[in-house]
Amino acid sequence: MMYEMLYFLVVGLFAGLIGGLLGVGGGFIFIPAQLLIYNYFEIPRELQIKLAIATSLAAVVFNVAASSYVHHTNNAIYFPIIKKIIVGIILGSVLGAFAAEIISSSYLEILFGMFECLFGVYFIFSPNLASTSPFNNLNFLIMNMLVICTSALSIILGVGGGIFLIPLLTLLHLPLRQAIGSSSLATLMVALIGALIMIVPTLESCTTPFALGYLYLPAFIPLSMGAIISAPFGAKLTHTIPVFLLKKLFGWFLIILGIIVLIR
């Protein structure tokens, strides 16, 4: 168990650094890392992806909480937008959490693997987002509908939501660094709501040792510790270095992880 804890601690450190830098929650790394090792824990295959999603969401809470604080100290969180989309965040998170418990594990794995690859392509080929979008007057009712959909999908995939929220926020004429900072706070709310719902004990998940609902404690604790340590450093780097090259490298990394999940 000690080696497994060390493994998850290293994963948490890496995911926290990337999450803080790019404004994403870290679930793209948390979930594959768990799936790759859960077979050795003798956890039933049908429970692995749901444990990974809930544990990822709970760890993302600590990841983005640490990075959000740093973004806030750098005045990179635009609270007026957060206030206007908070209804969409809450509704989407609740719907997504219940959907993640209902959808079969095999479909969840396929969905995650496919979206992991798609997001990798997005990071590789996405343009450098700037504050020149022509959609700065986008209707906020439409925006909340989009946020409901993206928040729900973020919970189902266990990724928190930053990957969806950053492009949406730039549609509102928000500079990239503020979009990243605001995304961190929104992701914190999405992940917190989803995690709280999915850790409520169920008859199925409670049969797994060391699990609280779908929260797998031996993975959650070191993942969270690692993310808390490294996320603030990633958030600080957002304000000091260009992220263009890192986005490309991270995109290829996501594609590899997505393929691994699909063929495992």
Image (cartoon, grey):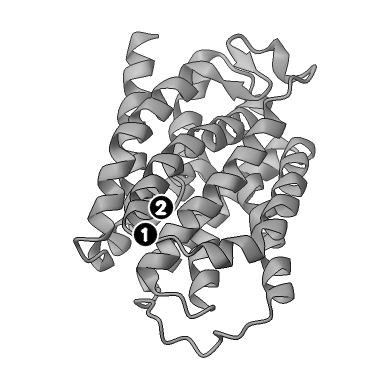
Please indicate whether residue 198 sits to the left or right of residue 64 in the image. right
- Judge by depth and name the residue closer to the eye, 189 or 94: 189
Left or right: residue 14 compared with residue 151: left
Q: Does the rendering let one see residue 31?
A: no
Pick the residue in front: 117 or 243.
243
Q: Quadrant of the N terminus?
A: top left
Q: Relative to 148, does residue 133 appear above or below in the rendering? A: below
Query: Which residue is at a point 34% across and 30% down the rendered structure image?
Result: 226
Residue placed under numbered mark 2 in the picture: 254
Residue furthest left in the image: 241
Task: Please state the horizontal and vertical placement of residue 140, each as a whole percent of the image.
Answer: 68, 75
Q: Give the amino acid type for the residue marked by disc 2 in the picture.
A: Leu
- Separation of residues labelled 1 and 2 (CA atoms): 5 Å
Q: Position of residue 180 (x, y in %)?
A: 41, 61
Residue at screen point 77% across, 48% down: 95
Instruction: Check contact, mark 1 vs mark 2: CB within 8 A.
Output: yes
Q: Is residue 3 above or below residue 124?
A: above
Q: Which residue is mark 1?
A: 251
Q: Horizontal and vertical percent for residue 89? A: 67, 55
